[in-house]
Image (tube, rainbow, N blue to C red):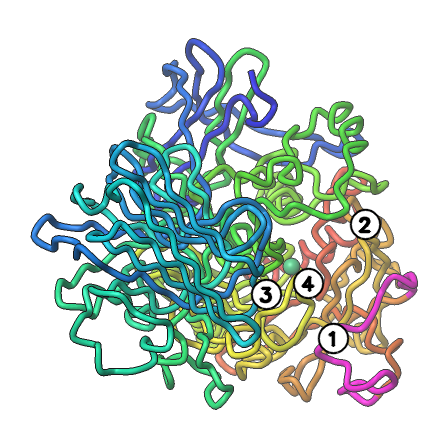
Amino acid sequence: MTTEFPPLLGYADRLSVWAGETVAVKVSSYLKGHYTARLVRTICADPNPEGIGLTEASVASEFSGSYPARIQPFRPGSCAKIALPSESAFPKTFTLTAMIWPTRLASGKQVVFSIGKADSGPGLMLGLAEDGRPWVAARLADGDWAEVILKGPLGERRWTRLSVTVNGLTNTLTLRARNGETREKSQLVADKPVALSTEVPDSLIIAAAHAPGSRLNFNGKIEGPAVREGDFELDEFDQTQKQGALFAQWDFSRDIPSSRIVDIGPYQLHGELVNFPARAMTGSNWDGSEMCWRHAPDQYGAIHFHEDDIYDFNWDTDFLFHVPKELQPGVYGIRLEQEEFQDTVPLFVCPPRGQRTARICVLVSTFTYTVYGNHARPDYDPSWKKKIEAWDAYPWNPAEYPHYGCSTYNFHSDRSGICHASHRRPLFNLRPGYLTFGANACSGLRHFQADSHLIAWLEHQGYDYDIVTDRELHDEGFSAIAGYALVTTGSHPEYHTPETLDALLQYRDQGGHLCYLGGNGFYWRVAIHKENPSLIEIRRAEGGIRAWASEPGEYYNAFDGQYGGLWRRNGRPPQALVGVGFSSQGRFYGSYYRRTPESYDVRFAWMFEGIDDELIGDFGFSGGGAAGFELDRYDHFLGSPANTVVLASSENHNDTFVVVPEEKLTHTANAAGVSDTELIRADMVYFETPAGGAVFSTGSITFCGSLPHNGFKNNVSGLLGNVFNRFLGVR
Ligand SMILES: [Fe+2]
């Protein structure tokens, strides 16, 4: 057994399903024999023994049983593949060229072009040698390789025109490179024929090699790759008089939202992208006159390839789960077990399409879960394993398995930001019992596991609830949540499309009751890929708390052409939807709220019934307090409705808390024009809408972590119960 791969892992083709529909489950096992699969319902995903602990229920299912174990491989690295039909006979003498912008020089051989056969490998590779110098290798008729390497290294993140001419008559290879700093040319005459002059290649790959097992992926941008008949000097590519010799030229500025690359040459040799490299990237001719690729596509003819791009493992299906229509909506797991190992593939089961089985709808933030999928945290420390073992927590951490593809909170190996995310692969941090922060005194949970505090509370208090996720909300819009008496988020509904925001706004304004039980919600704009809807794009544009920064000129999404980044920069600050928006972040610590004088108004007596405390939530399993880590505040300037009432505000945050960058103007001034200290707070707010609905927001990401405190008997639980009961019309 290898330690490079956890022995038993699975994923499903979808994270959520309407009851009555089907899920395909894919499993890879490095163990011999059979694994078993069964269905569980997840009540609490927090393994902290001081709390209620991991809680689940077994559920009978048609797929329960034993399946043969098999290894399913996956192969990171993006590239473009072009099939060469036999009628498009390769010219006897040709020149291959592209503009390249390498981002990881001297990290091993990297291939820009590979021409060859799918079964027998490459006949010609053009790219960079181990040390980053321009390189070409051609297979000769007897199987030997002829190589040419130029002298000068290329600059990283500098555009270079690279070309090779293969003269099949004289068996000459001519390698050329030119950029603002260097111009080089070197020639080799082989003593044997070049294989490509006698063999007919069946495929051309851009940014990787044909070689099975080692694809020698290129890291960086490629623009305007082309094949021309004849021998060209580099300068001649800038002229038009020899255009008639064009064999193929791929224009990456066409069909940018798709996975197709378009050949504008005579043979229409269109290709397919593999593993979703980044498109709508600035090209060598981008001059800053346009920021949006839709307005000047000719300046966006580059694709950024990465050796570690991987978003859809494309594993074969092991079994199908036909979710029965009568299955109670909820949070489920497909439990895989073999020897002492197990894995749990999460599945959020919604009611049957078009139906409701409860009056409460929990909106599960699957877009946010996916965007954080396999977040390899820089603060991960192997010493956490002691706690993981003691708590019987989920054992695998993405920081130890980066080859499974990291999250959009991580960098590629070339230090460019990861801007694509997908759940069609095992996501270690989307498992019951996974610890995000292993060194904290609290449970240290975020996302799926933290949201299970709310699920556990609903179960304990005896509320019936349905599940709808971002996926259904995006696809179906308002109709996915229409008719519920109450829609509630979890701890961190951060990532949204225009469709999900529209649906929530419509629900609110048509008299719905909306609870936002988190912090830093409704923050980033994301786009969904039209061909592969499990693929999400995020451009970390302009400002905000950013894990990395999009490059200038690359703020517009490739998937939908819209301006990426914060919703605040897109005319929709979160305050306008839920009354509060992101204001401050610190380390994973929680403090408490103090009730405001307004909260004692008789109009809110129902909300605080049974609560004598002035301080709310000075306890909890997330950060030790209900107001912590990521804090949102009321701001009328940013759209908090005029009738918003601040019921409680947090205070006493430790000195790790800072004001978010989008609020800062200078080293001393912020946009609100008050002291920074005043902006370091969570506001708990309430407002009613003209149609008879209402919104309750907590403005803190750690709020739900306080619900299970003291066996669910506490003032956070009491307060939320009062709000829910009012919204449900129970009292
Ligand atoms: Fe976040």
Q: Residue at x 86, y 58 (%)?
A: 591
Of 404 and 110, nearer the camera is: 110
Q: Residue at x 34, y 37 (%)?
A: 23
- Magenta region, residue range: 652-673
Which of marks 4 and 1 precedes in the sequence? 4
Task: Determine the image quadrant of residue 49.
Answer: top right
Which of marks 4 and 2 precedes in the sequence? 4
Q: CA distance from mark 1 to mark 4?
A: 16 Å
Question: Percent position (x, y) of residue 255?
Answer: 28, 69
Q: Residues within 10 Å of mark 1 (few under 14, many from 20)?
A: some
Q: Which residue is mark 2?
A: 623
Q: Secondary structure at mark 3?
A: loop
Main structural element of the magenta stretch: helix, strand or loop?
Answer: loop
**Residue type, mark 1 in image:** Pro
Q: CA distance from mark 2 to mark 3?
A: 46 Å
Q: Which residue is mark 3?
A: 155
Question: Percent position (x, y) of residue 519?
Answer: 68, 63
Q: Secondary structure at mark 4?
A: loop
Front of the two marks 2 and 3: 3
